Amino acid sequence: MKWRLVKFSKNSAFMNMSIDEAILEMVRDGLSPPTIRLYGWSPDAVSIGCFQSMEEEVNVKRCMELGVDCVRRITGGGAVYHDSEGELTYSIIAREDLFPKGIRESYREICGYVVRGLGKIGISAEFAPINDIVTHGKKISGNAQTRREGVLLQHGTILYSLDVRKMFGVLNVSKEKISDKMIKNVEERVTSVRSYSDASIEKLCESIETAFTEGREYDIGRVSNEELSKANGLAKNKYGSRDWNFRR
């Protein structure tokens, strides 16, 4: 089976989530190949898990002031700050029978590609169940998954650089808690590529691409016109709507 690799590009939060879902629908219908996509976020964004409350998790007013996108994912997990310059995101979308049946086992397999990609730039990392990747005991990648109508979608972030104060500014953390002590505590639990490697983000992309495609037959492709048409509709009517993003 031949896969498609869609190389890195930046999009708004609404388009990123819409493209992932559009590809999922096309893979479900047998109209698109299994796909690996790398992307970034422009402008900065916050995404929340499918079952979270935007107003509970996110400082929406501050995001509006800073021009930060706020979007709800179709996957679970927690609120995530996406820095336009400090993060690489991947998604992998394919029939679920291509992966282990168990949630933990499928996370282990897919996160294993990220672990190998980090290894290619000199970072020794490991899978930390259920859906994290850690290096030197610190989280460097968070991942989320959903399965719909026979198709698995997993996307995840790889932290390239980390600005904890900026992150706290857009998530709902009280001013009293944004102390040097708390920031130090977060920095002791979360890390980034830049802390352990001098690789550029372009080199990181290349390493992750290689890790995901090794041993696979694949073509370098693009998001198709039909997928883009679906994505534009989803961005307008779903991911860019208050009904979706503030439904809880």
Image: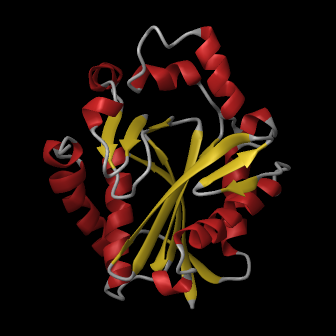
Where's residue 208, x and y in %?
A: 68, 60
Quadrant of residue 29 within the rendered picture: bottom left
Relative depth, front residue between 48 and 102: 102
Relative depth, front residue between 137 and 150: 137
Q: Is residue 160 left or right of residue 35?
A: right
Where's residue 156, x and y in %?
A: 54, 54
Q: Residue at x 40, y 54 (%)?
A: 76
Quadrant of residue 112 within the rendered picture: bottom right
Color scheme of the displayed model: secondary structure
Q: Residue at x 24, y 67 (%)?
A: 229
Relative depth, front residue between 136 and 208: 136
Relative depth, front residue between 113 and 102: 102
Residue 77 in the image: above or below residue 212? above
Residue 71 in the image: above or below residue 116? above
Where's residue 166, x and y in %?
A: 50, 21
Q: Is residue 91 left or right of residue 172?
A: right
Quadrant of residue 217 within the rendered picture: bottom right
| Quarter of the rendering occupied by the C terminus | top left
**Farthest residue in the bottom direction?**
1
Where's residue 247, x and y in %?
A: 17, 45
Q: Is residue 77 left or right of residue 185?
A: left
Q: Residue at x 31, y 75 (%)?
A: 25
| Quarter of the rendering occupied by the N terminus | bottom right
